[in-house]
Image: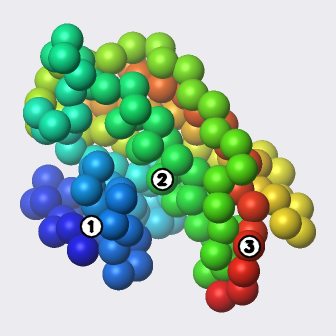
Amino acid sequence: MAKIPKQLAGFKAWGDGEPFEDKSGPFFMRLNDPNQGNLSAMITDSSHMNSGGFLHGGLLMTFADYALFVIAYDELDGAHAVTVSCQAEFLASTDEIGTILHATGTVTRNTRSLIFVRGQITKASDPNKILTTFSGIIKRVGNK
């Protein structure tokens, strides 16, 4: 399980750890934030950059996929689920190492087996600067 950086006090890891997300992020969450709902966060480092020195699109997509589940956490109610679909639009980037990113969003529809989610990734220091918008569909595949 990834250690929570001091800059993300109040956040927690997902369960006992998620090997892929812990290695590619690590990513963290804070549930029921009074201002932002279920919130995902990460801190950029040099391993997140592409050869041009900017945040890699694959990292942003991986963070968006993680955020889908954080946003839908309450609706999942502990059930296992998988991503059926995930789309991302890259609107801006950053070359800053040490930047805290946030992902927030909403559940747009919740059916018996599918949860539809949309969200955005922003810099915590400038929440009006949207780096990425995303939407996705999560499918429940098991019980709690």
Q: Residue at x 15, y 24 (%)?
A: 96
Q: Position of residue 19 (x, y in %)?
A: 33, 66
Query: What number of labels is visible?
Result: 3
Q: Which disc is residue 66 wearing? A: 2
Q: Which one is in front in this view, the residue at disc 3 or the one at disc 2?
A: 3
Q: Which disc is residue 108 wearing? A: none
Q: State the residue in front, 26 or 11.
A: 26
Instruction: Give, as a three-letter code, the residue at label 2.
Output: Tyr
Q: Which one is in front in this view, the residue at disc 3 or the one at disc 1?
A: 3
Instruction: Give, as a three-letter code, the residue at label 1.
Output: Gly
Question: Alpha-carbon neighbours of circle 1 within 10 Å: few (<14), some, or many (≥20)?
Answer: few
In the rendered structure, which disc, 3 or 2, sits on the residue that comes first in sequence? 2
In the rendered structure, which disc, 3 or 1, sits on the residue that comes first in sequence? 1
Q: Secondary structure at mark 3?
A: loop
> Toward which corner of the image does residue 121 lie, by quadrant?
top left
Q: Which residue is mark 3?
A: 141
In the rendered structure, which disc, 1 or 2, sits on the residue that comes first in sequence? 1
Horizontal side of 99 relative to 19 (left or right) equals left
- Quarter of the picture holding the N terminus: bottom left
Q: Which residue is mark 1?
A: 10
- Residue lying at the far right in this picture: please name it: 112
Q: Secondary structure at mark 2?
A: helix
Q: Which one is in front in this view, the residue at disc 1 or the one at disc 2?
A: 2
- Quarter of the picture holding the C terminus: bottom right
Q: Secondary structure at mark 1?
A: loop
- Residue lying at the far bottom in this picture: please name it: 144
Can residue 77 be seen? no
Mark pair 3, 2: CA separation: 17 Å
Q: State the residue in front, 84 or 63.
A: 84
Type of colouring: rainbow
Can residue 95 be seen? yes
Relative vertical location of residue 131 with respect to residue 114 in this rendering, above or below:
above
